[in-house]
Amino acid sequence: MGRGKIVIRRIDNATSRQVTFSKRRNGLLKKARELAILCDAEVGLMIFSSTGKLYDFASTSMKSLIERYNKVKEENHQLLSPTSEVQFWKGEAERLRQQLQYLQQSHRQLLGEELSGLTMKDLQNLENRLEISLKGVRMQKEQILTNEIEELNKKGSLIHQENIELYKKVNLLQEENKELQKKVNGSVNSNEANISPRTPFCISNGYDLHAPISLQLSQPMPQTNGTPETTVKLG
């Protein structure tokens, strides 16, 4: 079972505090010694206990380490002065300007310009760079095309699935229409069978209704009531 996490705070018990100090001090000195040996580093360590006792370790000489420390601190302090800072940024600007010129020249050479001053080795290096660049471009192009083809295949599969679903729905609607048509036809036949035939009403007056009818005009009969005939004259 592992130890629980120790809360980093001051140990109130004096005995426990002294025991912890001894253990941690020895471990810190051991780590400093290992760091100096493994990494070829100059390490200086000074520890003052709560009682004022000094414990130190130096990979070379503590005095030389302190002098070097003070020198580096002074140089860093000088770099932070306005004059040193201006010089520093001027140097950085010049370095960036040269880098920009180099990149512009390399870009023109990759486009096939300003090749007159190049040697055979430089031209071979330029050719290798172009081949590597073209290979990278082709790989990126193939990857994009592959992704697009996969996307189109996915869309095609989805459309095909939708077509299948629509075809099933159409077949289902056709079956429902057939069932409804059968029900309608069965209902009509049942209604026709339930209606009984009736004898049409006929009115007969002793004459043949289908015989041809002949109409003739006759002369007007003379009046017999002895009234004299009146002649009307129109002016």
Image (cartoon, rainbow, N blue to C red):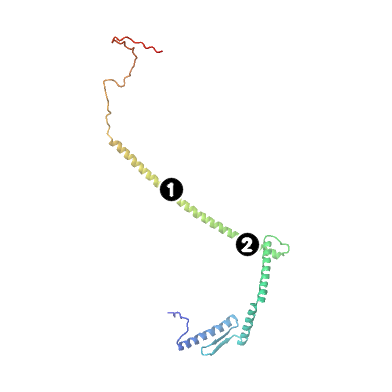
Dot 1 alpha-carbon crowd within 10 angstroms: few under 14, some 14 to 19, many 20 or more:
few
Q: Position of residue 117 (x, y in %)?
A: 73, 64
Q: Residue furthest right?
A: 116
Q: Residue at x 63, y 79 (%)?
A: 77
> Which residue has dot 2 on it?
133
Q: Quadrant of the N terminus?
A: bottom left
Q: Residue at x 69, y 65 (%)?
A: 122
Give above or below for 214 relative to 93. above
Q: CA distance from mark 2 to mark 1?
A: 51 Å
Task: Please give the label number shown on residue 167.
Answer: 1
- Residue type at tag 2: Ser
Q: Secondary structure at mark 1?
A: helix
Q: Is residue 150 left or right of residue 78?
A: left
Question: Residue at coordinates 60% horizontally, 61% vertically from top-left?
Answer: 136
Q: Position of residue 225 (x, y in %)?
A: 28, 10
Kind of residue indicated by mark 1: Tyr
Q: Quadrant of residue 189?
A: top left
Decide: is 181 above or below 55: above
Find residue 205 and report its horizontal and vertical position in percent: 26, 21
